[in-house]
Amino acid sequence: MSDITTRSGVTTSRSRWKAVLRRWPIALAVGMSAAGLAAGSSAGAVTSLAEVLMLLPLLYLMVARIRRPEASWPLLLALVVLYMVLRALDVVAIPVVFTALALAVMVWGVVAGDLRRSGAFRAQALGMIGFGALALVALVVEPDLGRYLVAAGWFLHGFWDFVHFRRNAVVSRSYAEWCGVFDILLAAQLVFLA
């Protein structure tokens, strides 16, 4: 009888670990958010977060264009590396590069006929325009207002992520889950820990 109980306990323990492992994107988001607490919300940090806010819808737009959700994580890595290189070189403004990339992907989509036939691409193009505009405005207004605009952008993008997670649309579910949690936590840090 104790063997069955032990086996049952092991099975229950294993299923708990499997459930935790399935939620690895949440753990990653919480860990990254906690690490970001050290950066604070100085004017420089807010500027960086406004620039990165443009990266998020750009990734969605790119994935919608190529129609390959499994490319979400590799594209995130590539865009983060691009961001870091642009930041290190400091030759051209990062928002200019991200805006140019977004325009190039949109033109590519128009030429390929995606605006006519793909509701997903249209939605991502509108998202890019909306989130991009919010980020650009946040970069040029008074710093305190900019912080709140950036926080609103991150919060709204978190909601955007959760909608895509729920629908299992455009990006991979693990990416949408991670990004949604990370975005909401980052928005809260900008508002409450300033």
Image (cartoon, helix red, strand yellow):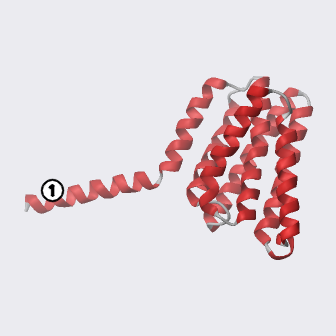
**Along the line of sight, which residue is nearer the eye, 172 or 88?**
88
Left or right of residue 174, residue 147 in this image = right
- Residue type at mark 1: give it: Thr
Quarter-wise, where is residue 66 in the image?
Answer: bottom right
Query: In the picture, which quadrant includes the C terminus?
Result: top right
Residue 191 x, y percent position in the rendering: 73, 34
Q: Where is 50 relative to 91, above or below?
A: below
Left or right of residue 113, residue 84 in this image = left
Quarter-wise, where is residue 78 in the image?
Answer: top right
Residue 17 x, y percent position in the rendering: 35, 52
**Along the line of sight, which residue is nearer the eye, 52 or 99?**
99
Residue furthest bottom in the image: 117
Query: In the picture, which quadrant includes the N terminus?
Result: bottom left
Please report the residue visible at 52 percent of the width from the left and 37 percent of the height from the top: 31
Secondary structure beneath label 1:
helix
Residue 122 x, y percent position in the rendering: 83, 66
Residue ID for mark 1 = 6
In the rendered image, is residue 191 in sight? no
Residue 39 x, y percent position in the rendering: 66, 25
In the rendered image, is residue 96 in sight? yes
